[in-house]
Amino acid sequence: MKVGLFIPCYVDQFYPGAAIATLQLLEKLGVDVSYPKNQTCCGQPMANSGFAHLTGGCDKLFTESFRHFDYIVAPSGSCVLHIKEHLHSTENADDAASIRNKIYELSSFLTDILQVESLPARFPFKVGVHQSCHGQRGLYLSQMSELVAPGFSKPGKLLNMVEGIDIVQLNRPDECCGFGGTFCVAEEAVSVKMGKDRVEDHLSHGAEYITGVDMSCLMHMEGILRRQGSKVKVIHLAEILNSYQ
């Protein structure tokens, strides 16, 4: 298979380590990965702010950049969900429709498409797992705790393959961190309070790291951790799966 690597703009600018780990991990698993150099923002910030009609340029560029791949993989649940639900193109409608069906968040690609059963990874630390809202409720990467249904977690399944990792149990395993994209700007007080509550759940259970599939959520919690003077770090799922410490 030929896979196109989509790196969201905030990952590219602020957390390149997550992007590099994603590439290296896919290559270790034998995947033929290409990075279209003309790619840029998927358009989610504009759409979330009520300006979806201004994302035409983003949609056009994304479609042209990724239409020739068998799959598209990204280390971001929220950006993937945006593409799956909103990508459109008046010039290349069929290509846009095809992309919406073949773009995957990293953990779902590893579990559903590659069907990974083991990983040569080691990370001997106590880790709290943040279930981001878009990943959980939009992409169904893990079960929602309010449902009376068998539990599952695609990121959790992969993390359990990592040698030495100690995954801490949270009181509220799928509570929102309060980031919400432009929500954290428009409703900063509410966003910060939600973030503090989310961070405290991890801290109270002794987490040394907080991980997840969305660096945007982790970035929000990282800011709170830094302001509190905490030594707890945030780390993308790909960086743990690609690690051997």
Image (cartoon, rainbow, N blue to C red):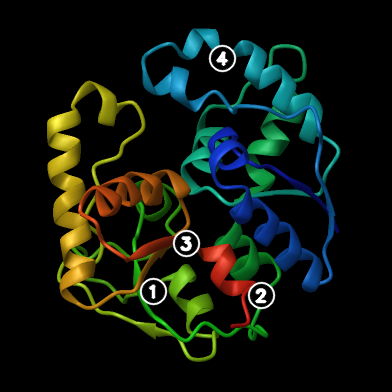
* Label 4 sits on residue: 55
Residue occupying the far front of the picture: 229
Q: Earlier in the sequence, mark 2 or mark 1?
A: 2
Which quadrant would residue 113 be assigned to in this image?
bottom right
* Label 3 sits on residue: 235
Can residue 81 be seen here?
yes
Q: Residues within 10 Å of mark 2 (few under 14, many from 20)?
A: few
* Residue found 73% across the figure and 30% down from its top: 39
Q: Give the CA distance from mark 4 to mark 3.
A: 30 Å
Q: Amino acid at mark 3?
A: Ile
* Residue found 71% across the figure and 67% down from its top: 25
Q: Could you say where residue 23 lies in the image, as x and y percent from the top left?
A: 74, 58
* Label 1 sits on residue: 152
Q: Amino acid at mark 2?
A: Gln
Residue 150 higher or lower than 181, as above or below: below
Q: Are marks 2 and 4 in contact (CB under 8 Å)?
A: no
* Residue found 59% across the figure and 28% down from its top: 42
Q: Give the CA distance from mark 2 to mark 1.
A: 15 Å
Residue 66 higher or lower than 228, as above or below: above
* Label 2 sits on residue: 115
Can residue 105 be seen here?
no
Q: Could you say where residue 116 lies in the image, as x and y percent from the top left?
A: 66, 78
Q: Residues within 10 Å of mark 1 (few under 14, many from 20)?
A: few
Q: Amino acid at mark 4?
A: Thr
Q: Amino acid at mark 1?
A: Phe
Q: Earlier in the sequence, mark 4 or mark 3?
A: 4
**Secondary element at tag 2:** loop
Is 188 on the left or on the right of 106, as rendered? Answer: left
